[in-house]
Amino acid sequence: MLGLPKTRNTILTNNDIFRRIRYTFDLKDSTIVDIFALAEVSVTQQQVTAWLKKDEDDALSP
């Protein structure tokens, strides 16, 4: 897989990177929705919550 950063022999997914950015900037779900709106992309807080769940989470949406 080209272009994906590795950490401790694990490839980071887009969601991994998204989680790290959210944590680094201490962004709330509503703020993330507002950021997407600035780019004229409509997302819901439920979508953001699903994206931010750990991949191992049983409640992870497909």
Image (cartoon, rainbow, N blue to C red):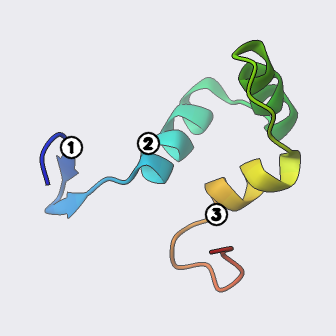
SS class of the residue under badge 3?
loop
Judge left or right: residue 45 versus residue 6: right
SS class of the residue under badge 1?
loop
Judge left or right: residue 1 versus residue 44: left
Of labels 3 and 1, earlier in sequence is 1
Q: Position of residue 30 (x, y in %)?
A: 87, 33
| The C terminus lies in quadrant | bottom right
The residue shown at (83%, 23%) is 34
The residue shown at (21%, 43%) is 5
Q: Which residue is mark 1?
A: 5
Residue 1 quadrant: bottom left
Q: Which residue is mark 2?
A: 17
Three-letter code for the amino acid on which mark 1 is drawn: Pro
Of labels 1 and 2, earlier in sequence is 1
Labels 1 and 2 touching (C-beta < 8 A): yes
Residue count near mark 3 (Cα–Cα under 10 Å), binned few <14, some 14–19, many ≥20: some
Up-down relation of residue 7 to residue 36 (above or below): below
Three-letter code for the amino acid on which mark 3 is drawn: Lys
CA separation in Å, label 1 and label 2: 9 Å
Three-letter code for the amino acid on which mark 2 is drawn: Ile
Determine the residue located farthest toward the bottom in the rendered image: 58
The residue shown at (77%, 53%) is 47
Of labels 2 and 3, earlier in sequence is 2
CA separation in Å, label 3 and label 1: 20 Å
The residue shown at (71%, 61%) is 50
Q: Position of residue 9 (x, y in %)?
A: 13, 62
Q: Which residue is mark 3?
A: 53
SS class of the residue under badge 2?
helix
